[in-house]
Image (cartoon, rainbow, N blue to C red):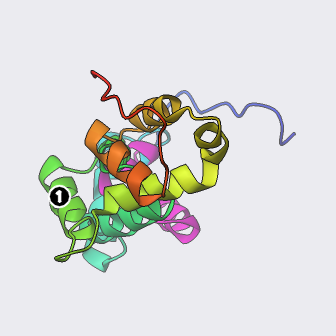
């Protein structure tokens, strides 16, 4: 039955051809990072079969960590995630730190006179989700919520200013 938990076979298969087939099947659904696909294949196949399947997918051009990181980072930015939160998500996908840093640097780069992408994302959250708290004069709660989402204090203050929020109390919070 579909709602029942699937049981995995006790023995993992060493069939490299079946691992490649499974990798192709998984890649038709969505993109994966190499490490993420490897870990997924290791659930049913041996490490050697999973590694050969991942290598075959890289060789065919179906897997590319740089392309995946850029695509995932753009999605996270569109979801108004902070740079720190985006880095955490990409790190959990098994991407290398240098690739994450380069990808986020290119995506969050700003031109002269434009606000930082982090500030724009935080301002969008302020306008979308925290209007009521600002109307009640609770800018402190908005700044705390943005901090929990991975935005720095300076970014949160700039986002409030960009969103047109006029906090009644201009007290700097000591974080």
Quadrant in the picture for residue 154: top left
Q: Nearer the viewer, residue 141 or 88?
A: 141
Residue count near mark 1 (Cα–Cα under 10 Å), binned few <14, some 14–19, many ≥20: some
Q: Determine if the magenta segment contains residue 38.
A: yes
- In this rendering, is residue 128 above or below 145? below
Q: Is residue 24 left or right of residue 104?
A: right
Q: Position of residue 125 (x, y in %)?
A: 53, 52
Q: Give the image location of residue 55, x and y in percent.
A: 26, 63
Q: Which image quarter is the N terminus in?
A: top right
Residue 144: in sight, yes or no?
yes
Residue drawn at x 59%, y 33% is: 9
- Image quarter where the C terminus lies is top left
Residue sitting farthest toward the top: 174
Give the prevailing secondary structure in the magenta stretch. Answer: helix
Q: Dividing the picture into quarters, in which one does residue 110 lie?
A: bottom left
Looking at the image, is 169 positioned above or below residue 21?
above
Name the foreground residue: 162 vs 10. 162
Q: Which residue, given by chain and number where applicable, does mark 1 sit on?
A: 99
Q: Which residues are magenta?
A: 14-40
Q: Position of residue 46 (x, y in %)?
A: 37, 40
Disc 1 element: helix
Query: Which residue is drawn at the image coordinates 17% and 55% (left, top)?
Result: 101
């Amino acid at each position: 039955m579909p709602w029942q938990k699937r049981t995995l076979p006790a023995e993992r298969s060493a069939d490299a051809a079946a691992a490649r087939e499974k990798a192709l099947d998984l890649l038709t659904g969505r993109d994966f990072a190499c490490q993420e696909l490897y870990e997924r294949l290791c659930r049913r196949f041996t490490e050697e079969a999973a590694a050969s399947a991942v290598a075959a997918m890289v060789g065919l051009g179906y897997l590319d960590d740089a392309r995946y990181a850029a695509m995932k980072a753009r999605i996270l930015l569109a979801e108004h995630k902070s740079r720190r939160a985006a880095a955490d998500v990409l790190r959990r996908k098994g991407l290398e730190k240098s690739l994450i840093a380069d990808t986020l640097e290119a995506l969050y780069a700003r031109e002269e006179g434009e606000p930082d992408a982090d500030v724009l994302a935080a301002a969008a959250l302020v306008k979308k989700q925290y209007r009521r708290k600002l109307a009640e004069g609770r800018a402190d709660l908005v700044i705390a919520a943005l901090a929990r989402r991975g935005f720095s204090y300076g970014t949160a203050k700039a986002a409030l200013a960009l969103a047109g929020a006029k906090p009644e109390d201009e007290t700097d919070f000591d974080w």
